[in-house]
Image (cartoon, rainbow, N blue to C red):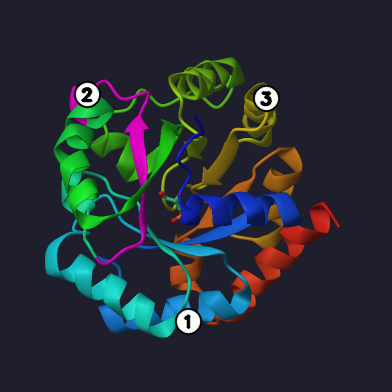
Amino acid sequence: MRFEIGPIESLLVEAVESRGSAHLTLIDPDAQKPKQAGFIAGAASLGGTDAIMVGGSIGATGGLLIDTVREIKKQSDLPVILFPSSVAGLCRNADAVFFMSLLNSRSTSYLIENQALGAPLVFRYGLEPIPTAYIIVEPGGTVGWVGDARAIPRKKPELAVAYALAGKYIGMRFVYLEAGSGAEMPVPPEIVEMVKKSLGNTLLIVGGGIRSAESAAMLVESGADLIVTGTAVERSMDVASFISGVTQAMRRVYA
Ligand code: 1GP
């Protein structure tokens, strides 16, 4: 019997296989009005992003979440993947969800309880679950605090490898290394490199504090398969050009 891999996951895998890496644009529903989120998604699509992630640590729930997803879908054909911080971050009009466990949390709430409460909703809403090991690296930001994480020290790549391998062996097909939204520095390239070497085919997502094309390209060179940018997109005056700069730099790594 084969794994049941859904269409959105397949699309991400194919993007990475054909171009060496893929780019995800994170939109926090709490950071702008739904219509503005729609414009950002439209521009991100023009810039060559592969999918839109929707979520945030605080306030990304309810009507605001649903309206944000609706506007994003109006302005682009890109898949919308939820990036929930709790069961409240689920809604039925998205396509998929990074079904994550925050592996280095001290709280059972972020390890399995929200997942158990959310699973029947994922099923009922027909969302595609993408099993993902979520690992927080220093500084960790708001998500590290909210998620009660013991953030991986920046100089301890072996600890990141241990958690990433545990996620892989549990059966998660994606590992997400997170420095925290708006982090001063992204996850160190040394950590990305060691984790990717240990993971093999398991896809590695890296996010938090990635603000430039150079930084994205350097992380891809170190082994990141998917790069997430959120804050830099929110702050950009020209989202399409910013993302196109990032995606082109990422493509050059494997050209
Ligand atoms: C946060 O990894 C994402 O969960 C994106 O971080 O907002 O710093 O791009 P930024």
Classify mark 2: helix, strand or loop.
Answer: loop
Circle 1 or circle 2, nearest the eye: 1
Report the residue at 51% width, 34% height from top: 173
Report the residue at 53% width, 74% height from top: 44
Q: Is residue 91 visible?
A: yes
Circle 3 or circle 1, nearest the eye: 1
- Magenta segment: does it hold 99? yes
Q: Amino acid at mark 1?
A: Gly
Which residue range is magenta in the image? 93-109
Label 2 near ligand 1 (CB < 8 Å): no
- Mark-to-mark CA distance, 2 and 3: 26 Å
- Mark-to-mark CA distance, 1 and 2: 37 Å
Quick one: label 1, few (<14), some, or many (20+) residues within 10 Å? many
Residue pointed to by mark 3: 194
Residue sitting nearer the eye, 251 or 219 = 251
Residue sitting nearer the eye, 244 or 78 = 78
Classify mark 1: helix, strand or loop.
Answer: helix
Residue pointed to by mark 1: 42
Label 1 near ligand 1 (CB < 8 Å): no
Residue pointed to by mark 2: 107
Report the residue at 45% width, 62% height from top: 231
